[in-house]
Image (tube, rainbow, N blue to C red):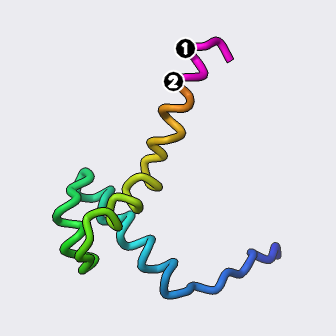
Amino acid sequence: MARLPTQQARPHGLRHAAITAGFDRTGGDTRAVQAFARLRDANTIRHYDDSRADLGGAVAGHVADGVGI
């Protein structure tokens, strides 16, 4: 029987996973997820959304395609 790698769940990781799932399930509704996460600052919730969508990576890919890299 193969052994599966074990990972310890940590509170911050669970919170991040829940917020990410909230974005996925609401179609990216920032206000709803911000209320769910009980975050006052909208900039904080945008970091979660940017990480989920990898917006910077998508733009970098478009730029690289445009310059022939």
- Find the distance from the CA under tag 1 to the CA under tag 2: 6 Å
Type of amino acid under label 1: Gly
| Most frequent secondary structure within the magenta stretch | helix
Q: Is residue 60 above or below residue 37?
A: above
- What element does badge 2 sit on? helix
Tell me which residue sits at (82%, 76%) in the image.
1
Dot 1: few (<14), some (14–19), or many (≥20) neighbours within 10 Å?
few
Residue linked to disc 2: 62
Label 1–label 2 contact, CB within 8 A: yes
Instruction: Tell me which segment is drawn in magenta.
Output: 62-69
Q: Is residue 40 above or below residue 25?
A: below
Tell me which residue sits at (54%, 23%) in the image.
63
Q: Position of residue 31 (x, y in %)?
A: 17, 63
Q: Position of residue 52 (x, y in %)?
A: 44, 54
Residue linked to disc 1: 66
Type of amino acid under label 2: His
Q: Which label is found at residue 45? A: none
Q: Position of residue 45 (x, y in %)?
A: 32, 65
Tell me which residue sits at (18%, 74%) in the image.
35
Figure quadrant of the C terminus:
top right
Tell me which residue sits at (40%, 60%) in the image.
47
**In the image: residue 46, left or right of residue 56:** left
Residue 8 occupies quadrant: bottom right
Q: Position of residue 2 (x, y in %)?
A: 81, 73
**In the image: residue 54, left or right of residue 68:** left
Q: Is residue 67 above or below residue 19?
A: above
Asked if residue 41 is among those painted magenta in the image, a careful observer would answer no
- What element does badge 1 sit on? helix
**In the image: residue 23, left or right of residue 17:** left
